[in-house]
Image (cartoon, rainbow, N blue to C red):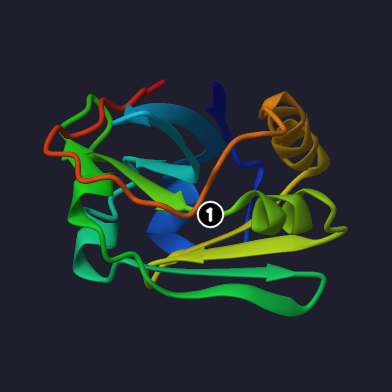
């Protein structure tokens, strides 16, 4: 299941980042490993153009603040979940950040959710993005098992807009 990344309307910044298009979405997937089904959930961030260059490859960090409480802070360390490709308006950077449902639920229920990606991208999520997260959470099977991380050699394919 994919909550297709939707453009963020509120960029809390000036300069080149203001000309970037930043989208946020989410992805739920299940994988069969031996006789088990392993569930995965990720936030999906995509930055397109704007003269920033490859900002996430320089400082791949993420901070999410929900109603004044920092719920995620640190580096995005799995290179397999990062992709950069040339686009007509500049580089298209996509990063997936694995999260557990309880954290995505906390984000979805927030009144004010602020995100800082790398050094330059600061944004605020709006109610349509937050309700999209809640809808995706409602589609996850109640018996889904999270927490195990299967070894996968294949890189994920990214959806761009």
Name which quarter of the figure residue 117 lies in.
Answer: bottom left
Q: Residue at x 75, y 51 (%)?
A: 105
Q: Is residue 13 in view?
A: no
Q: Which residue is drawn at 36% across and 24% down?
A: 160
- Report the number of discs: 1
Residue closer to the observer: 106 or 147: 147
Q: Residues within 10 Å of mark 1 (few under 14, many from 20)?
A: some
Q: Is residue 13 rendered to the left or right of residue 89?
A: right
Q: Where is residue 95 in the image (x, y as percent from the top left)?
A: 35, 47
Name the residue that disc number 1 marks.
Answer: 99
Residue closer to the observer: 38 or 48: 38
Q: Position of residue 3 (x, y in %)?
A: 58, 26
Q: Position of residue 154 (x, y in %)?
A: 14, 32
Q: Residue at x 45, y 52 (%)?
A: 98
Q: Is residue 147 rendered to the left or right of residue 32?
A: right
* Depicted 149 relative to depicted 89: above or below: below
Quarter that holds the C terminus: top left
Residue closer to the observer: 56 or 15: 56
């Amino acid at each position: 299941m994919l909550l297709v990344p939707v453009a963020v309307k509120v960029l809390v910044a000036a300069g080149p980042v203001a000309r970037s298009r930043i989208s946020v979405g989410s992805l739920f997937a299940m994988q069969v490993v031996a006789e088990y089904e392993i569930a995965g959930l990720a936030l999906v961030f995509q930055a397109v153009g704007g003269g920033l260059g490859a900002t996430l490859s320089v400082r791949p960090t993420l901070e999410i603040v929900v109603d004044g409480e920092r719920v995620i802070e640190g580096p995005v360390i799995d290179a397999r979940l990062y992709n950069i490709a040339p686009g007509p308006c500049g580089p298209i950077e996509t990063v997936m950040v694995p999260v557990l449902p309880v954290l995505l639920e906390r984000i979805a229920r927030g009144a004010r959710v602020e995100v800082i990606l790398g050094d330059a991208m600061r944004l605020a999520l709006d109610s349509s993005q937050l309700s999209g997260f809640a809808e995706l959470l409602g589609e996850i099977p109640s018996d889904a098992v999270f927490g195990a991380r299967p070894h996968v050699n294949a890189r994920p394919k990214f959806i761009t807009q």
